[in-house]
Image (tube, helix red, strand yellow):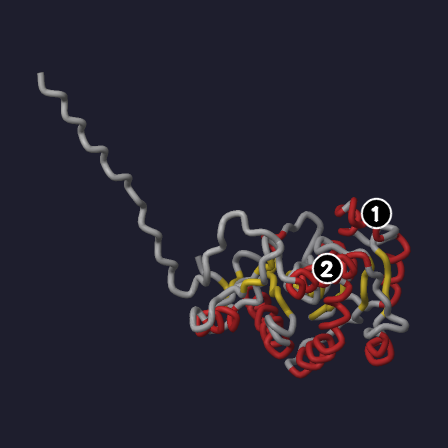
Amino acid sequence: MPEPTAEPMPEPMVEPTPEPLAGTGPTIPAGAGSAEPAVPATSPGQGGAFERRVRAVTPARLFLGRSGTSLRTADQLALRADHAAAQDAVHAALDLETGLLAPLGDRFGLFAVGSAAPDRATYLRRPDLGRSLSAEGRAEVARRCPRGADLQVVVGDGLSVAAVDAQVPALLPALLDAAREAGWSVGQVFAVRNARVGLLNEIGELLDPAASVLLIGERPGLVTAESLSAYLAWRPRPGHTDADRNLISNIHARGVDIPQAVARILALATAMRAANTSGVLVKEDPAGPSALTS
């Protein structure tokens, strides 16, 4: 009997190595150890123009390199510094006497009162207390601020004193001057420590302005701790919600600059006056803020 002929074994399949996408940089080998040299986010000649285009429109942490399995030292230190700045902004105290806001006291009579939150720790745990004035603060505002102004501007520390210190010294004078030039009567500006946006309702009830503007520090992030918001409301009253307010956010050096912020605040206030309302029925568009008709 002839011996059976052994069938040849098939050759093993070899998966082709995928080519890296253009601009994605080198592939990091599996199990790379910390002893490996730092690897840039993009290889020379790859992704340079694309990276520059992206960086021109966002400050997000993109195209970071690595050292082994970790961030490079410079990137790690920058991340920690930005995180520390955000924490400092949240826990700092509003200073009208010796800080960057002090000149506004001499020029505009800016003074500060407290919310119902007695200290910063309570304010962070109890947001509801930041939505109303303390009894002493309410009495002080009633005593020093005239009722019935066309435009009442209030400064609130919110979640970032750093934002107030960075933006309000330039924004407040520009806004008050522009409002007066536009024919608005302006109320006595004041500041509130440990403030939340809901304060607008009590201020509207207490002072009865037509339009109220609250300049307040935004929750800081890792891109910037100096971003300010301007909340606007037409004749705010207790029970009003965010749906009854308008907002201009990201007022800072790399966002909405001071001239833009002033123009947008006054344009929104004008649209609110024309519509006799604020909130979801008043919108901003490329042609300027206007009231919805349906």
- From the top left corner, tell me how far across and down residue 34 is, in percent: 62, 54
Q: Is residue 148 visible?
A: no
Q: Secondary structure at mark 1?
A: helix
Q: Earlier in the sequence, mark 2 or mark 1?
A: 2
Name the quadrant of the N terminus. Answer: top left
- Per the image, label 2 sits on a secondary structure element best described as helix
**For residue 150, above or below residue 293:** below
* Crowd tier of the residue under label 1, counting other residues whose Cα lies within 10 Å: few below 14, some 14–19, many 20 or above: some
- Left or right side of 13 for 177: right
Residue with the most extreme left position: 1
**Residue 72 sits in quarter:** bottom right
State the quadrant of the C terminus: bottom left
**Which of the pair 182/189 is nearer the observer?**
189
- Density class for disc 2 (Cα within 10 Å; few <14, some 14-19, many ≥20) is many
* Image position of 220 (left or right of 63): right
**Which mark lies nearer to you, 2 or 1?**
2
Asked whether 147 or 200 is in front, the reply is 200
Q: Which amino acid type is marked by label 1? A: Thr
Indicate the amino acid at tag 2: Ala
Rendered location of residue 45, percent (x, y): 43, 73
Give residue 251's quadrant in the image.
bottom right
Q: Up-down: is 69 above or below 263?
A: above
Left or right: 91 as drawn, with respect to 225: right
Contact, mark 2 vs mark 1 (Cβ under 8 Å): no
Q: Residue at x 76, y 66 (%)?
A: 162
Is residue 170 at least partly visible in the picture? yes
Residue occupied by mark 1: 122
Residue at image x 61%, y 72%?
254
Q: Quadrant of residue 176?
A: bottom right
Q: How far across and down, in percent of the image, does residue 188 sit?
A: 80, 71
Seen at 83% across and 72% down, the residue is: 110
Residue 86, numbered label: 2
